[in-house]
Image (cartoon, rainbow, N blue to C red):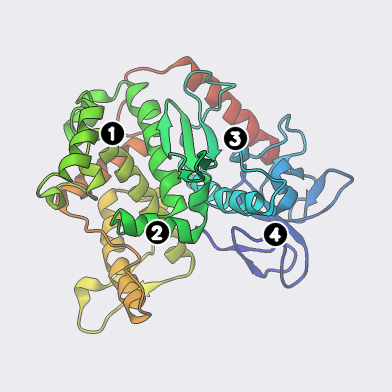
Amino acid sequence: MRLFSCAACGQPVHFDNRSCVKCGHRLVFAPQTMSMEAIEPAGEPNWSLVAHPERQVRFCANEVNDICNWSVPAESNSNFCPACSHNRLVPDASTEEGVEQWRRLSQAQRHLFYSMLRLRLPHPNRDVDPQGGLVFDFLVDEVAPDGSIIPAMTGHDEGLIAIRAAESDDATREQIKSNMNEPYRTMLGHFRHEVGHFIWNKLVRDADRLEACRAVFGDEREDYGEALKRNYEQGPRPGWQDTFISSYASVHPWEDFAECFAHYLHIVDTLETAHAFGIAIEPEGHRELETDVAFEPYSARSAQQLVDAWIPLTVALNSMQRSMGEADLYPFVLVPAVVEKLEFMHKLLHDKIPAQRQTDWQQGFQQQAHQDQALLTT
């Protein structure tokens, strides 16, 4: 994540800020230019950008209740930003619990979309792609007649991503993390993993890159239901650490792909944060742990370049976590087989693996993306 500045006074501002603590200007994130912008009233409902007064924006409709801090161009036909426009079911905003859940879900969702927009990844909604467009349902738990809780399920089905809203609560999520013996579990991790399945649909299946993907991740035609059953009954396959980023990645090629996609975003976005803050690791007497993120991670030349910077950074971060009595921030090991998968992911997301076909939704989505970009950049 970049470190931004207030255009009105130069104060450092962050991705989730709503106003500048120094000069008081309202702030919005402008997804068309990937920038945090200081704004001034320009006649309800429009606001002008301090840096470019000729450009006007509106708040995303979910600015109500402090849920979203993104903007839409004043000329846009949509009331919602590129992230919120994909939402179908959301928590109950008439309750304090629902609003708080929605805020936390939205924060993770916007961080996801920041990476998707930076990488220019496809995210057609159901208007453009009625059968497989990206849509989110934030599901609340049900209460059984006996008063017990029936947890909502997080998952993906042809572009429909269901997220259990209750996991936006830290205590609930940490309890599940402990029960399932998982080393890492976050809302942002859920979003990145589930969207990984959507990306497989769009960039692998729909673009007919199946053989190239199978050569790295295995044959996805393996029975998914049987693979899940085997995992739950027998546990992860022996020796999974030699080939997979996590035990869950070993369940099925689809899960391996989604886990690697999520980790690619973990790595790139965290390295961009380190780059923004000028973080360098120079432990005396340990040159093998030196690193300086002196490159733009979202434009890295290879996954190996990312990994070479990532490993020393995570060693330092994990050591600091332990010094505070906390668990490792990144409790994973990037073995050579995983680095090879991340290399495939890097090439795929940067369109360096030839696609065999382009579908109608891709053409329509690309045209709409160009139109949206022109609203703020011309």
**Marks 2 and 1, the one that precedes in the sequence:** 2
Q: Residues within 10 Å of mark 4 (few under 14, many from 20)?
A: many
Pointer 4 with pointer 3, Cβ within 8 A: no
Q: Secondary structure at mark 2?
A: helix
**Marks 3 and 2, the one that precedes in the sequence:** 3
Question: Of tags 1 and 3, which is closer to the observer?
Answer: 3
Q: Secondary structure at mark 1?
A: helix
Nearer to me, 17 or 91: 91
> Type of residue at label 4?
Arg
Please give the residue where the numbered disc 1 appears in the rendered image. 254
Q: Give left or right: position of 221 versus 57.
A: left
Q: Residues within 10 Å of mark 2 (few under 14, many from 20)?
A: few
Pointer 1 with pointer 3, Cβ within 8 A: no
Please give the residue where the numbered disc 4 appears in the rendered image. 18
**Marks 4 and 3, the one that precedes in the sequence:** 4
> Residue lying furthest left in this view?
238
Please give the residue where the numbered disc 3 appears in the rendered image. 89
Question: Of tags 2 and 1, which is closer to the observer?
Answer: 2
> Residue lying furthest bottom in this view?
284
Please give the residue where the numbered disc 2 appears in the rendered image. 175
Pointer 3 with pointer 2, Cβ within 8 A: no
Question: Of tags 1 and 4, which is closer to the observer?
Answer: 1
> Type of residue at label 2?
Gln
